[in-house]
Amino acid sequence: MIKLKIGLGLAGFFTIPIETAIETIANIGYDGIEVYVWKNYIFDSSVLDPDLLSDKALKSMLDRIATSAKKFNLEISSLLALDINFGYRAPTEVNRIQHIKFTKQSIDMAEVLGTKVVNVTSGLPLEGYTRKQSWEKLIDSVGSYVDYASGKGITVAMEPHAPFRGQDMMVDSLEALLELLATIDSKSLAVNFDPSHFSIRGWDVPAAIRKLSNHIIHTHFKGSRGLIPEYNWYIPGEYPDDVDAIKEFALALKEVHYDGFISVEIANSRRTDILFNPKSAAQLAYKTFSSVLDQF
C-alpha cells in the first residue's frame, strides 16, 4: 500500500533553537523536514543564507540540523533553494550568474545534509530581454546546475510558480514545465509540485498530476483560498474546505503511485505575523493532514 509522508518546512521556527524545533516537529508526528535556503531573505534565522553566514557557521548549522533530524528519526525530504533577488525582483544577467552559483552552493549544502532533492523555481524574465531570450538563458542556467547536481547524485526539482505581482514566472504552468523537461532531458531534473499555484488560477490539479506522473519527486502543500488576483495562502487547516483539497491532492498522488513527501508550507503572511506560533501552526497542519491520510 502506498503511504504518503508528511513533512514540514523549517521556516518560521526562528524563535526556537533548531534542535528544539526539530524535536517539536518529530513529537507532533511529522515524518520529515524541509530545509529552506533563501538568498537575500533576512527576516528569519531558521532560513539559511550562505551570504549571511561564514563557512564555519553554515557548516555548523547544517551539521546541527542533520544530527538532530537523525536523533529524532526525521528524514530531510529536500532542500528548498530560493534566490529572492533572482526570483522576484526583475532579475538582471548579473543576478542570473549569481543565481547559478547560489544554486550550486545549495546543492553542496544538500549533500552535507544527506538529502537527494533540491527544490527550485525559475524566476521572472530577465530585465531587458525578451521572453524568448530569457527562456534560452533559463535553459543555460538550469542545465548548468542540473549537470552539477547529477555529479553528486542529487535531483533538482523545478516548481511551477504562479505570477508574482502581475508578472509571469518563466516556468509558471504545466505547459512551460513540460517544455523545460523535454529540453533538458536529464534524470537529475524532476518536479516539485505545489497545487496552490494551480488552484489559485482555477486549474485542474489532478489532471496536472497525471500528466506529470513520471516526473514528480517532491510536493508542497499550503492553504489556498480564492483566485488571482483575490487570493491568499495560509496554514493548512484554517478553513474547513482544506480537508477536501488535501483529499483531492492525496488521491491524485496515489493514483500515479507517488509515495514521497507532502511538505507542508506555512504561508509567508502567517509566518511574519507578530502573533505567529510555529508549534501551533505545525500542530494544526499535521492534525488536518493526518485526519485525511488516515482514511486511506
Image (spheres, rainbow, N blue to C red):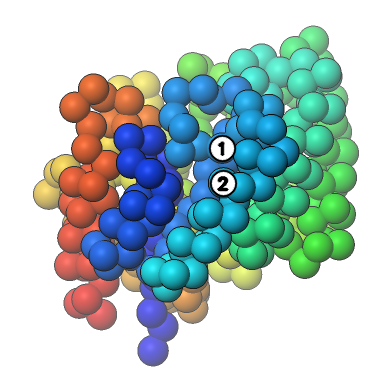
User: Residue 223 falls in which quadrant of the image?
Assistant: top left
Residue 172 visible at all: no
Count residues near mark 2 (Cα–Cα under 10 Å), then give few for <14, some for 14-19, many for 20+: some
Identified by mark 1, the residue type is Leu
User: Mark 2 — residue?
Assistant: 61
Does dot 1 land on a helix, a strand or a loop?
Answer: loop
Q: Considering the image in quadrants, where does the C terminus appear?
A: bottom left
Residue at point 18%, 46% (across, down):
280
Residue at point 77%, 67% (across, down):
153
Residue 29 visible at all: yes
* Relative horizontal placement of residue 43, taking residue 78 as reference (left or right): left
Residue at point 68%, 27% (across, down):
51
x, y (%) of residue 12?
Answer: 36, 37
User: Mark 1 — residue?
Assistant: 48
Answer yes or no: do the residues labelled 2 and 1 have beta carbons within 8 Å? yes
Residue at point 39%, 69% (across, down):
72
Above or below, 138 against 261 in this view is: above
